[in-house]
Image (cartoon, rainbow, N blue to C red):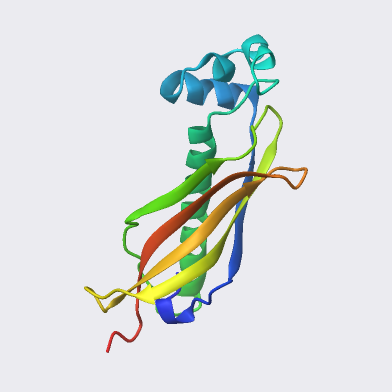
């Protein structure tokens, strides 16, 4: 992963896609969000969604899985090149979570993020604080999911 100084505002990163199947939607819903329109096709058709819809939490979980996997891939590539790898800190949270459009059976959602702001931490000057907008876009080019994430990013030169 990159250091705080190496990250530019506006930088965009595509980090994967996922196709939502009926089986995946029902499996996730049965365990974590057992609402009728996530569990049954007919109930989904009768709902405002018009079809079996993935839970928004399912979409968020897929986004996180792909984001972490891509971070591991980038870290391995940097290490293989002999570069010093930045070990990012935890996230102090997120804001503005939005489920903008339903994700239905067969939808493929592609995920990306774009850096919106960055600043040095006042209390921990060895860390920067980064905010990035994470979005999911379906195969029709419609944004279906969005949130603003915050992360602690190590600084290469804290002095």
Q: Position of residue 150 (x, y in %)?
A: 40, 60
Quarter of the image with the C terminus in it: bottom left
Residue located 53% across and 34% down the image: 56
Compared across the picture, whether 83 is left or right of 102 comes to left
Residue 114 sits in quarter: bottom right
Q: Position of residue 153 (x, y in %)?
A: 37, 70
Quarter of the image with the N terminus in it: bottom left
Front-lying residue, 26 or 116: 116
Q: Please, which residue is most extreme toward the top here?
A: 42
Q: Is residue 128 above or below residue 111?
A: below
Residue located 45% across and 64% down the image: 131
Q: Please, which residue is most extreme toward the left here?
A: 123
Q: Is residue 139 above or below residue 43?
A: below
Q: Please, which residue is most extreme toward the bottom here?
A: 159
Q: Position of residue 158 (x, y in %)?
A: 29, 84
Compared across the picture, whether 105 is left or right of 26 comes to right
Residue 107 sits in quarter: top right
Residue located 41% across and 76% down the image: 4
Compared across the picture, whether 108 is left or right of 25 comes to right
The number of callouts visible is 0
Q: Position of residue 128 (x, y in %)?
A: 35, 74
């Amino acid at each position: 992963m990159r250091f705080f100084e190496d990250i530019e505002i506006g930088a965009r990163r595509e980090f994967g896609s996922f196709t939502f199947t009926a089986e995946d939607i029902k499996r996730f819903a049965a365990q974590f969000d057992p609402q009728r329109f996530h569990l049954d096709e007919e109930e989904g058709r009768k709902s405002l969604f018009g079809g079996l819809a993935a839970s928004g939490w399912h979409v968020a979980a897929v986004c996180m899985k792909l984001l972490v996997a891509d971070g591991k891939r980038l870290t391995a590539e940097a290490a293989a090149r002999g570069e010093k790898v930045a070990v990012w800190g935890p996230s102090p949270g997120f804001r503005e979570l939005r489920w903008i459009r339903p994700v239905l059976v067969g939808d493929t959602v592609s995920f990306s993020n774009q850096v919106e702001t960055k600043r040095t931490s006042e209390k921990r000057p060895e860390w920067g604080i980064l905010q990035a907008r994470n979005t999911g876009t379906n195969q029709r080019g419609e944004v279906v999911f969005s949130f603003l994430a915050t992360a602690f990013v190590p600084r290469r030169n804290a002095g």
